[in-house]
Image (cartoon, helix red, strand yellow):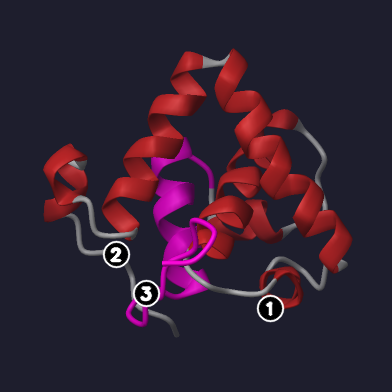
Amino acid sequence: MESGRLNMSNVTIVKIISATAYEFGVTDSEITGPSRKDVFTRPRFVVCAIAHDSGFSFPQIGKRLGNRDHTTIINAARRAIEVSVRDTSFRESYQRLRDALLGNYAKADKWQFISIRSEK
């Protein structure tokens, strides 16, 4: 592990998007869509941070999130950390997803039993 990034070969950006959409009660297309409403941007922040921690590059993440520029993805990943400091509910959802997707099933609760949709 280098700089907090993991090499998770079984985790895909599509799986991260699907799991995040489920956790936040939105659809995959709402996360990848153009809306700037908080209800969609906050889950998008989580996707960016977890995908980068999984070893994906910012350009790879941007391509899967509606062809967004890599600098937008960098900012979103930073915002995930900023928001988690202020918002306990967001922090709990973010940590639950990160634990489940990156292999820390001891803290994952329901996620260890949920089958995350595979990449189409």
Q: Which of pointers 3 and 1 lies earlier in the amino acid sequence?
A: 3
Classify mark 1: residues with Cα within 10 Å, few (<14), some (14-19) or many (20+): some
> Quarter-wise, where is residue 12 in the image?
bottom left
Q: Which residue lies at the image location 66% right of the left edge and 74% below the top edge?
A: 57
Q: Which residue lies at the image location 88% right of the left edge and 67% below the top edge?
A: 69
Q: Which portion, as a residue range, is magenta? A: 1-26
Q: Which residue is mark 3?
A: 8
- In the rendered image, residue 13 lying in the magenta stretch gets the answer yes
Amino acid type at image mark 2: Ile
> Quarter-wise, where is residue 1 in the image?
bottom left
Amino acid type at image mark 3: Met
Q: x%, y% of residue 72?
A: 85, 55
Q: Which residue is mark 1?
A: 60
Quarter of the figure that contains the C terminus: bottom left
Amino acid type at image mark 1: Gln
Q: Secondary structure at mark 2?
A: loop
Q: x%, y% of residue 37?
A: 77, 33
Q: Which residue is mark 2?
A: 116
